Structures are given as structure tokens and as C-alpha cells.
């Protein structure tokens, strides 16, 4: 997904407020934790006791099921051939293997690399530049973007769904009679995407002291290196700080709303130029290529960048500045193998194959 422009974001916020109206909007108090037994992964990162959801959009079996059906439905696109899963397949941890995907309805490359959809329930902002704040409004961007799903007329989309008996049934199961609305479509997609929880890797089982959670000595050495070098950006069990950093990719940045301006495109502050949201390290071995533009094809290339490939600039993060020495993390060549071993231990194979996260069975 590519973040929309400032004017588009303003329109999106207004549209979302109208869609939910009396329901209370897209922000507000959290819903109580859902009961046990619902059909989505139950493992959570260490220290987390429930999947957060908004009080006016709590997780329900029916809502999640509808969102899953919509996520895999190409009927949401203007040509009937592109679904959310086209660019976010579960086999790649809901990421895309192209630097700038060409899989949208126009066949044109997107401006940014498609991000992985992992543990979104705990993300404080969305898109590489943090242009959106909640999952309820997230899906409007790919739905309406001309190069993604290309829906220029959302009313026509809803009319087509209303002519589909299965769609009507699923919406009414989730939201009651008359439940087939655009607002409910967005809520259902948000519910499903909140259940995309990855927390059952060898690392997680090791942290919980469970069988199958043994980390090799090399991976444990890599974990120690992550704690030493990477926690400013990848701390916590989410392996992201939910913040924005300039990690030395470029010396110059665009102006105004240019996507190469990074976070500065949203805040319009010079000090935010070139800053991008920290991606999670979870399942990182599966989500190549890397960075906001997919410039690095391998994790080895990423580590080489942090060793001696960083570019100085006015907004380079302080974590990478080393006085008069070239910027970087000071990693030794011999430490790369340990880091790679630990990053591999963050692969959650159950996340790729969980029956509640893949394409639904046809009715």
C-alpha cells in the first residue's frame, strides 16, 4: 500500500467520520478483551494479554470472518482481479516480494515497497510515513488508489456487493439486517487485520519456556547483539518502536508531499525529512526486499548497509552517528552470522499457515 497525499488524507478522515457517524468514529476507548475460543491465533507476544480493538468495533467471530472473506476477494477491485492478498500473501508473512509492486489494477509500480501486515493491532501509525493512525480507515487507501484496487466509485462497489447473496448474508451475520455498508466493510477488514498476530516463532517459544523454543548458541549471541545495537529502533517484543528514523539511506530528500520526504511529508517539518517508520523484525527473513523502496534484496545487504553503507545527512538518527567516524552500528564481520541466526529465529511458520488467516473455504 502506498500512503495517500495530505489532501487525500484529509478527505479520508472526513469520509470515515461520516461513515461511522453515530457509531463514535474511528478512535476512542478500547473494547474489552474478546472471549476465548474465537477462530483466530491465540498466541500473543510476551507481555501482551489481548488484541486491542476499538469499543465501537470489537472483534467478533462473524466480523473477523467477513473481513477475511473481503481480504481475499478480488471483487473489491475495479477489474475484479486484485484482492488485498494479491500484494499481501500469507506465504510471505503478508508482504510482497517486489521492491515496488506492479500487481495493482494499473500495472504501474507503486511509489513505495508494500509493507508486511504483522501485529498491526499494536501499531500506533500506519504506512512508511505514518500517514494514518487506525486500521478502520486503512483500507480506503488501497481500495481507491488508481494503481492499487482502483475503485473510483465506492457506491458502485457497494451496489455490486449488494447484488451478491453471499456478501449480503455475511454482512448481516456480522452486523445485522441492513449491515452491508461501506463503514461496516472497513470495520470488518480492520477486525481481520487485527488478528494477523505473529507470536509463535522459536524466539517466542524460547521466551515462554515452551517446547520447540530452543535457540542455538549462535542465535542467542545474535539476540545479545540485537539488544546491544538495535534496541533504539527495534526494542520491545514487537521489534519496532513505532517511531520514525533516518537510517542513512539517502543524502537528499524530496520537498512538500514527495514520497521521498518520508515522515516530513506528513508533518511538513524539515527535521522529519528522510525519516521512515521502523518496520518489525518479526518474520523478517521472509519479507525481502527491505526498506521503504525495497532497495536491499537480502538481509546480508541490510547488515552491510548498517556496517559501512550509511549516508550522512542533516536528519541522520543520532543512534548511527559516531563522532568523526563514518556512521553505522559498528558491527564486525564475524557478528553478521549471529545476527542472521537470530533473525531467522523470528520466523513464525504458524503465521504463514494458520487456517484462520488463509483464504476462506467457499460456502
Image (cartoon, rainbow, N blue to C red):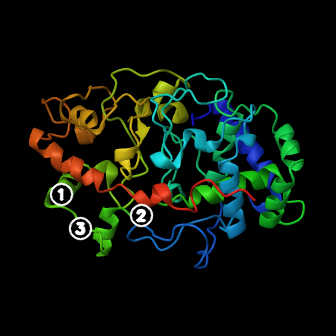
Mark 2 residue crowding within 10 angstroms, few (<14) / some (14–19) / many (20+): many
Residue annotated with mark 2? 199
Disc 1 or disc 2, which is closer to the eye? 2
- 313 versus 91 height, above or below: above
Q: Residue at x 54, y 35 (%)?
A: 266
What is the x, y in percent for residue 293? 43, 29
> Which one is earlier in the sequence, the residue at label 1 or at label 2?
2
Residue annotated with mark 1? 224
Discs 2, 3 touching: Cβ within 8 Å: no
Q: Is residue 241 left or right of residue 258?
A: left
- Residue nearest the observer in this picture, 110 or 258: 110
Estimate the spatial distance between the alpha carbons at disc 2 and disc 3, rounded to whole Å.
15 Å
Q: Which mark is residue 214?
A: 3
Disc 3 element: loop
Discs 3, 1 touching: Cβ within 8 Å: no
Disc 1 element: helix
Estimate the spatial distance between the alpha carbons at disc 1 and disc 2, rounded to whole Å.
20 Å
Estimate the spatial distance between the alpha carbons at disc 3 and disc 1, rounded to whole Å.
15 Å
Mark 3 residue crowding within 10 angstroms, few (<14) / some (14–19) / many (20+): some
- 266 versus 67 height, above or below: above
Mark 1 residue crowding within 10 angstroms, few (<14) / some (14–19) / many (20+): some
Amino acid at each position: 500500500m502506498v500512503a495517500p497525499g495530505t489532501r487525500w488524507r484529509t478527505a479520508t478522515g472526513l469520509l470515515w467520520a461520516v461513515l461511522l457517524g453515530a457509531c463514535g468514529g474511528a478512535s476512542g476507548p478500547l473494547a474489552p478483551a474478546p472471549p476465548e475460543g474465537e477462530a483466530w491465533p491465540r498466541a500473543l507476544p510476551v507481555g501482551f494479554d489481548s488484541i486491542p480493538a476499538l469499543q465501537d468495533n470489537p472483534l467478533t467471530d462473524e466480523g473477523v470472518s467477513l473481513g477475511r472473506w473481503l481480504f481475499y476477494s478480488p471483487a473489491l477491485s475495479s477489474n475484479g482481479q486484485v484482492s488485498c492478498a494479491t500484494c499481501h500473501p500469507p506465504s510471505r508473512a503478508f508482504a510482497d516480494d517486489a521492491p515496488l509492486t506492479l500487481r495493482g489494477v494499473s500495472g504501474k509500480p507503486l511509489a513505495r515497497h508494500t509493507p508486511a501486515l504483522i501485529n498491526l493491532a499494536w501499531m500506533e501509525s500506519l504506512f512508511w510515513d505514518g500517514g494514518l493512525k487506525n486500521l478502520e480507515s486503512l483500507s480506503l487507501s488501497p481500495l481507491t488508489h488508481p494503481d492499487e484496487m482502483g475503485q473510483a466509485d465506492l457506491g458502485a462497489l457497494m451496489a455490486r456487493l449488494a447484488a451478491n447473496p453471499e456478501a449480503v448474508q455475511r454482512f448481516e451475520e456480522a452486523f445485522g439486517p441492513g449491515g452491508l455498508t461501506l463503514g461496516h466493510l472497513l470495520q470488518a477488514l480492520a477486525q481481520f487485520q487485527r488478528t494477523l498476530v505473529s507470536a509463535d516463532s522459536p524466539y517466542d517459544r524460547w521466551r515462554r519456556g515452551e517446547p520447540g523454543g530452543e535457540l542455538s548458541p549462535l542465535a542467542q549471541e545474535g539476540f545479545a547483539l540485537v539488544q546491544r545495537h538495535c534496541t533504539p529502533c527495534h526494542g520491545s517484543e514487537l521489534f519496532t518502536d513505532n517511531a520514525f528514523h533516518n537510517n542513512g539511506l539517502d543524502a537528499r530528500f524530496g520537498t512538500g508531499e514527495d514520497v521521498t520526504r518520508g515522515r516530513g511529508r506528513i508533518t511538513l517539518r524539515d527535521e522529519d525529512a528522510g525519516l521512515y517508520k521502523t518496520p518489525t523484525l518479526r518474520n523478517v527473513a521472509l519479507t525481502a526486499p527491505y526498506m521503504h523502496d525495497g532497495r536491499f534484496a537480502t538481509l546480508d545487504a541490510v547488515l552491510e548497509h548498517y556496517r559501512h553503507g550509511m549516508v550522512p545527512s542533516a536528519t541522520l538518527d543520532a543512534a548511527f552517528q559516531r563522532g568523526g567516524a563514518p556512521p553505522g552500528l559498528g558491527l564486525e564481520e564475524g557478528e553478521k552470522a549471529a545476527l542472521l541466526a537470530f533473525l531467522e529465529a523470528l520466523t513464525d511458520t504458524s503465521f504463514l499457515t494458520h487456517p484462520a488467516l488463509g483464504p476462506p473455504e467457499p460456502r
